[in-house]
Image: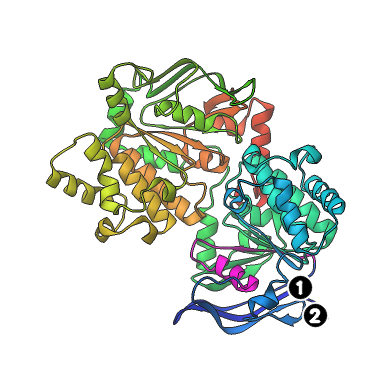
Amino acid sequence: MSEYVLEVENLEVSYGSTPVLHDVSFTLAPGERLGIVGQSGSGKSTTVSAVLGLLAGNGRITQGRIRFAGEDITNAPDKAMRPLRGTRIALVPQDPMSNLNPTMRVGEQIADALRAYGMSDRAEIERSVVRLMTEAGIPDAERRRKQYPHEFSGGMRQRILIAIALSGEPDLLVADEPTSALDVTVQKQILDHLQKLVSERGTSLLFITHDLGVAGDRTDTILVMHNGRVVERGTPRQVLLQPEDDYTQQLVAAAPKLTPLTGESTRVDAAAADAGSAADAASAAAVEPVVAVEDLTKIYRLRGAAGSVTAVDHVSFTADRGQTTAIIGESGSGKSTIAKILLGLEEATSGEVFLGGHPVRTKSRSERRVLKRFAQPVFQDPYSSLNPAWSIGSIVAEPLNVFGIGTKAERKRRVAELLDQVALPADTIERHPSELSGGQRQRVAIARAISSQPELLICDEAVSALDVLVQEQILDLLQNLQAELGLSCLFITHDLAVVANFAQHVVVLQHGKLIETGETAQVIAHPAEEYTRRLIEAVPGEEFTHA
């Protein structure tokens, strides 16, 4: 019997005649936790797909070997791989909402997996469903197994996927970005529980992530991939504290640091120093905050049942012109609800919101039009917020058309200028969102947002799904545009390390209530509230990425 659960040797994968993986080799011992890191397109997911026998389209292994528990599974037919998937090799995918059936109760989805793995007794299946949900950290499993995915939070839905993955008692668990969309405290809970289950069962873990802090905290060995090749491997301390390869050094340098902002050289201070006349003008107008939220409350009435949910509970804060104010908190804290109210997409139950001194709740059609131009959004997922049927030129020009800005020829020139401003090639204007990378799509979303020359950008988790290098590029772009155009920014995020590097002020929310607010440096270095301290302590990779 092999001493390794998984052996990948000199692996080459091609799509058509084009190789995309080159000479990839690694091993995974029983109980070992191996992390694969690298930016989008580095080959992480292709490697996992090759191991699972799930290469898309015309993808095929053109060289090398894959052995699972000593058995050669290179290019094994689906008939041979099907019995291995789930029972011997299990996958925890990234997005629970696209991997859970919204029309099925969660317990029945776990039961389906148990039946697929050979369990047939109904009572035994029900007991196993409750046991697996409980092991995955879901309280009151007997009751909650009868609920649907939309009745669970993002973290709880991820636990359902873990329960499904563990239902076959696999030897190898593949976790593909399982916590990238979760806030830090829920992420910590999920990773703590996953690590506990893996340790108790002796399961090997193949962990795919773009978060270097998570890789540092949660793996025994890190493999760094770039352009389809393994460029570095070693322990977390070796790879993250003493990186040898240039690309690894770039990744480590780009990772946001949980370092309080000071008067010394920082991204924010550097941008402020270069702001020029635009920032000076914004500073002169700073007596009037760009955003003022006064005693804001938003209550949602539950459909089909008595009762309500208070999403925002008597919240008050201001945001200064020409600067970035971050709103941070766990899922359900009220961050996105406040953003929707500011954008006029939701109406407050009580309280007032002012943009540039103008009330958002206005009956004047002309004032509503002014406010729509005053603030523009940049959302988390540019793919779903960009019309896939439109060209990039049409997408960026949309606000110009809506607000009637310029002639047709002037709009065309403006779109070309905007694409250049966000560092996209000129020929992007004729392309479609599906032809662009995630980072390029986010640049398009930013170009569209600034096209009508707003005074405020509202960024809702605008970089949370991006790898560290692309994230750094987008944050630099936002910072440069802020300095050049005198923009203000309301930055909604669950990532405190990004806040530390990007925002001058921070607002902390929990369960719809304002917990703490102040200058970023002060709040991170000396949090006044226990909840804020817990958020800071939950940020992964303190030993590796916080220095």
Q: Image quadrant of residue 288?
A: top left
Mark 1 secondary-structure assignment = loop
The circle on residue 2 is: 2
How has the structure been colored for display? Answer: rainbow
The percent coordinates of residue 207 (x first, y second) are 66, 61
Instruction: Count the numbered circles shown.
Output: 2
Q: Is residue 28 visible?
A: yes
Mark 1 nearby-residue class (10 Å; few <14, some 14–19, many ≥20): many
Q: Is residue 267 above or below residue 431?
A: above
Q: Image quadrant of residue 398?
A: top left
Three-letter residue code for mark 2: Ser
Could you tell me which residue is drawn at 59 percent across and 54 percent down? 211
In the picture as drawn, the residue positioned furthest to the bottom comes out as 63
The Cα–Cα distance between marks 1 and 2, rounded to whole angstroms, is 7 Å
Task: Please name the residue that numbered disc 1 is placed on.
Answer: 5
Three-letter residue code for mark 1: Val
The percent coordinates of residue 168 (x first, y second) are 78, 62
Taking the image as shown, residue 198 lies to the left or right of residue 323, namely right
Task: Inspect the magenta stretch and tell me whether residue 518 lies in it.
Answer: no
Quadrant location, the N terminus:
bottom right
The percent coordinates of residue 285 (x first, y second) are 31, 22
Q: Is residue 399 above or below residue 438?
A: above
Q: Which residues are magenta?
A: 31-53
Label pair 1/2, CB-CB below 8 angstroms: yes
Mark 2 secondary-structure assignment = loop
Q: Is residue 35 above or below residue 140?
A: below
